[in-house]
Amino acid sequence: MIWPVLHWADFPYFHTTGGPRVLQVINMLVDIVEWIDKMHPFWRRRGGRDHIFLFPHDEGACWAPKVLLNATWLTHWGRMDLVHESKTSFEADNYTKDYVGWRQPEGFAKLISGHPCYDPVKDLVIPIWRPPQHYWRSPLLSAPSKPRDIFLFFRGDVGKQRTILYSRGVRQKIYKLAKDNDWADKYRVLIGDGSDVPGDYSDLLSRSLFCLVATGDGWSARTEDAVLHGCIPVIIIDGVHIKFETVFNVDEFTIRIPEGNASRILEILQAIPEAKVRSMQAYLGRVWHRYRYANLPGLASELRRYMESNVADPLSREAAELSARKEVRLPRPFKGDPAVDDAFATIMQWLYSRIPFTR
């Protein structure tokens, strides 16, 4: 929403030009509510409680105008502290730095201050969209469960060219530890960007036991990447709910490490009993389908094609037969209907449960 509003809207944009990207969208949302309130009775009828707004921005609804406070927010960023500042390393998205222009001399900060980025009572942190080809090697698409021969995995931006604000310094710290201490050879820990960790991303994830989830400029897609591949998410993000945390007991399939203990990640993970690991893997197999979007006609058929291809692949069959003779690998390959109880259905079920609270 931010990019097209700022870069392609007709002049004079929303109230003023210039300033951070969030400025335009803040003003747009205020104008939207004023228009709804003027043209329809619905907003004032319940104070906006029965309205829903989507905030897919890096820092979610941290910059949402206060006029939307009563509405339900669907967001990717579950940051909960009441007093907060932007943590982005991208200055154009810094909502903490006010902007005063001749068309808006009072600035925009007063429109957004005084609320958390997310309220777990009325809002929901939802998964991002991942296309089927993103997790095509996963047991979730009926590929055989592979040996989890990678102990800890992360491939992505590790802050090589970033400021310390990026990822709150977590990705940078763990990457440096892994490189300096040769974790790849010693412990099968693969941390880095594409130049450090080559190979098929889905295949690597499906072979990983633990997967690092650390913030970037805001929300991280690594939760979905891990869950969709049956890899146990290792969350190092303080004060933030992950996707669907108020829907499922995420402690049953995730590991949380305080940011202050990030340097102890290897020690902490190595101390987890095998029985606990298998319990978390089994739990993942009960919820992972709810983190993918599948309930669309074309999308569901594409997912079924991937599932049929993985089942029919000779190497997959051979691997499945070999696995059957040994200990069962978890999560087991998914065999159900991909269109049933996906992420969208989960969101709708949650919204339905919230109807009494909007009255």
Image: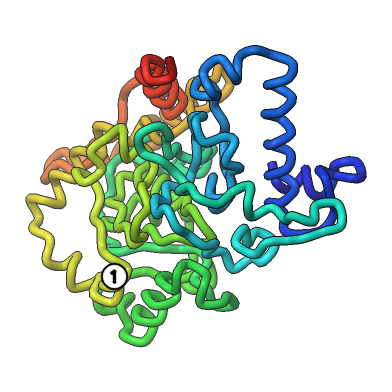
Looking at the rendered structure, the kind of residue marked 1 is Arg
Image position of 230 (left or right of 110):
left
Q: Is residue 315 visible?
A: no
Q: Is residue 94 left or right of residue 271?
A: right
Q: Residue at x 40, y 71 (%)?
A: 170
Image mark count: 1
Q: Position of residue 244 (x, y in %)?
A: 36, 37
Which of the 4 image quarters holds residue 348?
top left
- Circle 1 Cα neighbour tier, 10 Å, few/some/many (<14 / 14–19 / ≥20): some
Give the percent coordinates (x, y) of residue 172.
Answer: 44, 76
When the figure is inspected, residue 46 is found, relative to residue 245, above or below; the finding is: above
What SS does tag 1 mark?
loop
Closer-to-camera residue (115/307): 115
Quadrant placement of the C terminus: top left
**Which quarter of the rendered picture does the N terminus lie within?**
top right
Front residue of this view, candidates 157 and 332: 157
Rendered residue at 44%/74% (across/down): 169
List the residue tagged with mark 1: 188
- Residue 32 rendering spot, x and y as whole percentages: 71, 30
Return the residue nearer the eye: 128 or 26: 26
Q: Is residue 77 left or right of residue 106?
A: left
Residue 14 higher or lower than 305, as above or below: below
* Residue 97 visible, this orientation: yes
Q: Is residue 308 above or below residue 9?
A: above
Residue at the image position 45 percent from the left and 48 percent from the top: 116
In which quarter of the view is residue 342 placed?
top left
